[in-house]
Amino acid sequence: MVSKHRLLPLTALLGAGVLALAACGGGSTGAAASGSDSGSSAGGSAAFPAKGSGELNLYNWTDYISPDLLKRFESETGIKVHLDTFESNEGLLAKLQAGGTGYDVIVPSDYMVQQMVQLGLLQEIDTDTFPNGKNIQPEFKDVYFDQGRKFTAPYMHGTTGIAVDEAKVGGKVTSWAEFFNPPAGASGNMGILNDSNEVVAAALRAVGAKPCSETPADYQKVQALLSGVKGKLKVISSDGQIDRMTSGETTLAMMWNGAFHRASVKNKGITWVYPSEGLPLWQDNFAVPKGARNVDNAKIFINWMLDPKNAAEATNFVGYANAVTGSDAYMDKDLAKDPAITPPADKAALAQPVPPCSQTALDLYDKVWTDFKS
Amino acid sequence: MTDPVTPLTPGTAQPPADDPADGLAASAAPGTARTRPGRASSSGARRVHRPAGQGARSSVLPGTLFLLALVGAPLVIVVAYSFMSRGMFGVGVAGPFSVDSYVRLLFDTQLDGSKIFDPRYIGVFWQSIWLAALTTVCCAVLAFPMAVWMATRSPRTRALLVFAVTIPFWTNTLVRTYAWVLILNDNGPVSGLLGTPIGLLYTPFATAVGLVYVSLPFMILPVYSSAEKFDFRLAEAAYDLGARRLTILRRVVYPAVRPGLVAGVVLVFIPSLGAFLQPQLLGGGKSLMIGNLIEQQFGASRNWPLGSAVAVALLVLTLLTLMGFALAGRRGGQKVSLM
């Protein structure tokens, strides 16, 4: 048995180690893709590669593509897929910047695409010229982060809005302003995401400002709004949203639309709200990093994923909408007709992508968030 | 249990509490090692006698390299990052030396460039310290009677009880914490037993329950290891001499158990300072802890230097705590070494 006196230095070292881990845990997630050299790396503007062979190293979000779909891709094209996963855009960027990752296809979100293009980390692939490039829905062609889809192809998109059980809350909620000043019945049963970007942006909309505002006065209003709602919150968490909304532990919550859909399958009493001030539309995209060794295979994969049937199968697995024309026909019926996933015509314009905030705005976000949480 | 390094010379029956196993103490008295005829003759070949606690230099090389690579290097990186500026788009670090991150821990820069004191981050530290202290006190209050009771059982029962205390370590902390989510939530067994949900989950109470639950073994085991060495006949003697029960506990049992209690306090307080899981899962994320603050800076707020500075501040706080305990231990007459 360790002498009790010796526990002290041991603890000191442990403490130091834990700190070091906490600080360095931002990036890497283990094994990089295995080396592969069989795919040709012709690239350029040559004709679209007809057939593939060899390997493809895909770096995707955790649990974000159907394993069966990847198997079908392998059997149809003869390309072996190696899947590795990440958990945040920042982690993905940090890993790419470290270099030598060996990934052929990555899945950055909207704002991260813009930063990666500016940092010169992505290859031009001209998705428009792909055989299936014509399938990209027109409203997803000219996006702020990639005009004309030179670098990326759309994968999934979704929104962050409000889920409400009107019967239990005892009233309607139609806007972010009403979400942060809810009907009395919601008090103590509200849920909110544990995400400074989402919460502060929604609060900025509620006080009549724009997300990423750099006006300190806006943040004073946000701070007042957030401290007012804090006592009415049951939980600030991004995990377990579905369970809490299904069981009725929360009756009014800020939610992702895919999570709402899954909760609404079991709890018919809840409805999805498109807040009148607008809501963020996030988009995840396929891109090919510079230094990818199997560029042709990457293009074949991205083109294959733009096929309506394949895109629909991906949607059916993850529960978010894709941007491929004609995929509705293959989608699960309840997904296709859920207004949270497929927005009604009069609401579609409310969901718009939010460009990344400046460092100045992020610092203001951080301050009000720290106050809100502590 | 006897420490293998302790010289077991017949005739020098020392009380176990005065254990010279400490490396420093042993090396300061090299003479004790030469009075160990048993070892030398059993090893057969002639050997150079070394003072107890000192092996060949080369034999510590792997351990030293391990520590340097896995503790030293990351530590240097964290400290270096904390003195740098943000990288492009806030990911990573870059550029010139800067103490801005440390300034920001204490001061808020106004629009006109002036700095005013900002209690924001101090508040987060205070909250963490308070929660860690509460956990430590609860654990000590629960563990002390438990450990003393365990020590007074028969050796067979004792072994079984120690085993029982360590069983929770077989399961991951995250899983055990999630179990409390299921126990405390509105549809869980506690609400079921009471007949009506009383909203236990997502409260500071739930956070405290989770932290105390996870930390308790770290308090019971060291206290028990001290109590086990205590000769309970001393308590009987005190009783025979007319001391009241409380006096015996305070004047006879407590001093003997104190080293274990100090070790337990350190083992509970310091990990609780960095608690991250319980406030998030059980407390509903409604209070910000140091750990969450660090994560936030490396993630959404994209300020690695500030995150590193918070980590360094936590490290300094930890070291100060340890030094505080070392000093308190020294004043109390115990040898408590720090490194």
Image: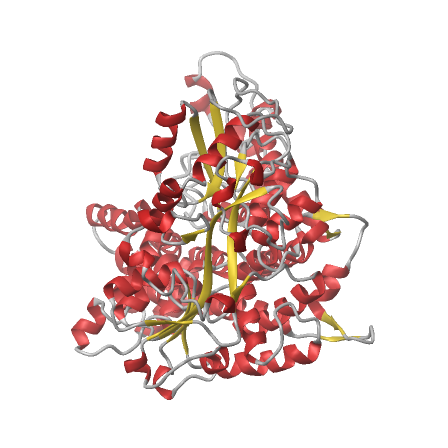
Residue at left 62%, top 49%? A146
Q: How is the image coloured?
A: secondary structure
Q: Nearer the viewer, residue B225 or B37?
A: B225
Q: Considering the image in quadrants, where does the C terminus of chain B appear?
A: top right
Q: Residue at x 39, y 60 (%)?
A: A342
**The N terminus of chain B is located in which quarter?**
top left
Q: Position of residue B273 (x, y in %)?
A: 51, 61
Q: Where is residue A355, by image quadrant?
A: bottom right
Quarter of the figure with residue B51? top right
Q: Residue at x 38, y 64 (%)?
A: A340
The x, y position of residue A373, in whole percent, is 52, 71
Q: Nearer the viewer, residue A218 or B166?
A: A218
**Front-lying residue, A16 or A123:** A123
Q: Is residue A87 left or right of residue A93?
A: left
A308 sits to left or right of A215: left
Q: Is residue B227 visible?
A: yes
Q: Is residue A353 above or below residue B49?
A: below
Whole-percent x, y for residue B36 in the image: 47, 27
Q: Is residue A209 left or right of residue A306?
A: right
Can residue B237 be seen? no
